[in-house]
Image (cartoon, coloured by chain):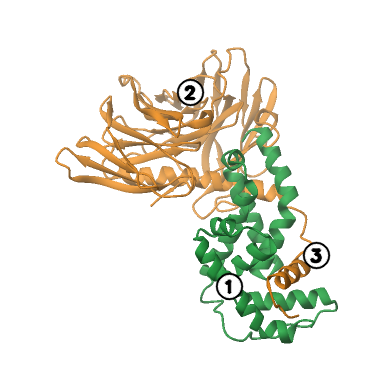
Chain colours: A green, B orange
Amino acid sequence: MHAELDAEFRKFMHARWPVMVRLAYALTGDQGHAEDVAQTAFARAYASWPRVSRAGNPEAYVRRIVVNENLNRFRKHRVAERLTGTLPESSIPDATRTSDDRSALIAALQQLGPRQRAVVVLRYWLDLSETEVATALGCSVGTVKSQASRALASLRQSADLVDGGAK
Amino acid sequence: MIIGDENDLREQLDRAFGPVTPSPAPIEGAVRRGKAIRGRRRAGAVASLAVAAAAVAVAVPLSQHATRAASPASGHYTATVHVPSPNAPAGAIAYGTINGQWWELVASQPGTDGAGRGQQLVTASGAAFGSSGLADVEPPFAPDPSSPVALTGLQSGTTQCQFGAVAADVSYVTVRLGNGIVLTLHPVTVFGVRVVAFAAPAGAEIVSATAYSAHGEIAAAIPFNDPIGGASFGLWLKPGQRQPARFSGRVGSGTFDGKAWSATAYVGPWGLCVVDRGGGGVSGSSCVPVLAGLGTSVMFWTAGTPEVASGSAAAQVTRLVVTQPDGTTTQVRPVQVGAQKFFAFAMSAGHKKVRWAAYDSSGHLVASSTLIPDAGVSG
């Protein structure tokens, strides 16, 4: 890769690393996994950087990989991480309200399917449009709308948020 | 915490994940893994061709280059190559200089440093390769039973290098460059395999390589010097063996989404090579060390807009139908160059499947497959 493109990638990764880790954290519920997923996404972006850079929206490209990496991770561990109605262990309360809220929210998000979780995070936290979310997930806008509606309804009913977090 | 509406959810997400402080960005790790991914894509495309080719002829693809064209090197350059010193790290293959700028080639132990099982990372570093160097993942070094030296190429914008395993009876190899310099390569043992390596300016013509045993010349090779500045070694000819004739021809060209593309095949003492030119000046090449007899398969495709796919066609193929992701179809006619038919077509980038099917004159399907542009895989 040309030195200018290499430098451009490094600058981009330095700037967008925190955002992608936070996105991956919201999707995976684990900061270690999140950093793995984000690094994989940036590595894959580097592998195609001349084309990604030319396309003009590298952030969308990396974001899509982060989402897909998480979906793939879930698929790979489908048996090992089968979702159940109740978590095997309750979260340990943290010393700060932020950590309590985060633990409760992570627990609630983990109760959603991986695609619903991705819709929630992309639509309501990153404030992407329904079209952008559909592009990131490779689905229709109608699917995004229905998944968002169902996810919101689930979160409203979530016992983790009512019982587990700071009220 | 209670989530009533979308605004509550936004606020809670922001409060929960906004303060998360990640570790420092592992930029070097991502770059290293990215280079390894790029190498695996290349190896995957080569492997898919090898499977197709094996059905018709015992042929192993030599190399693929995908890069922007390098400026032809002038004849005014110097190049040296040396065996590593006894204190060099494990995996060191060779070092040297180009125009006084140092370079070094080091292999990792197979299956380590980001290389998967059955792969080996090779790293070129030093001022001659620029600040970031080059890395590629290749199958582990192994002598090729059909040739005395199994050379593989790597290329940056300014420098190319060749490296590979040698047969047990090879004592040394000489490489003649276009400006008259002759490099002498002495094999070194790297992770149990005897290998050689050298480097030259990108775009510099590499005229030939000759392998010698303790008793004299074993074989010589004339590489294909592609227009993007790298060389591909293929056929090795024994002393006195006649050089194959040279042919070349345009096997596809046109415009796609308003951008010009083309593909040209070259047949000669190196074997079969195809050079693609896609959008944005991005080019790629692929070579196979045979003169004919390849079956019907896509050999490789290059990055760019559009992406250009090139392939070989069996003798009975008279037309191909290419179906783009939007359902539009294109008829493609294979072109004969030397004793082999080739075809090429353009496709849009974007991770969506492009299907191709080859037919004979009776309309019977000969072969078909799908490509996924960008992903570097075929399905």
Residue at (37% x, 35% y) in the render? B345
Q: Amino acid at mark 3?
A: Pro
User: N-terminal of the two: label 3 or label 2?
Assistant: 3
Which SS class for mark 2?
A: loop
**A62 left or right of A165 in image:** left
Which SS class for mark 1?
A: helix
- CA distance for labels 1 and 2: 56 Å
Establish whether labels 1 and 2 are both on one chain. no
Establish whether labels 3 and 2 are both on one chain. yes
Quadrant housing residue A30: bottom right
Percent coordinates x, y for residue A75 in the rendering: 51, 68
* Residue A11 to residue B243: above or below: below
* Image label count: 3
> Which is in the foreground here, disc 3 or disc 2?
3
Q: Residue furthest left?
A: B362
Residue receiving disc 2: B227
**B48 left or right of B162 in image:** left
* Residue A147 to residue B81: above or below: below
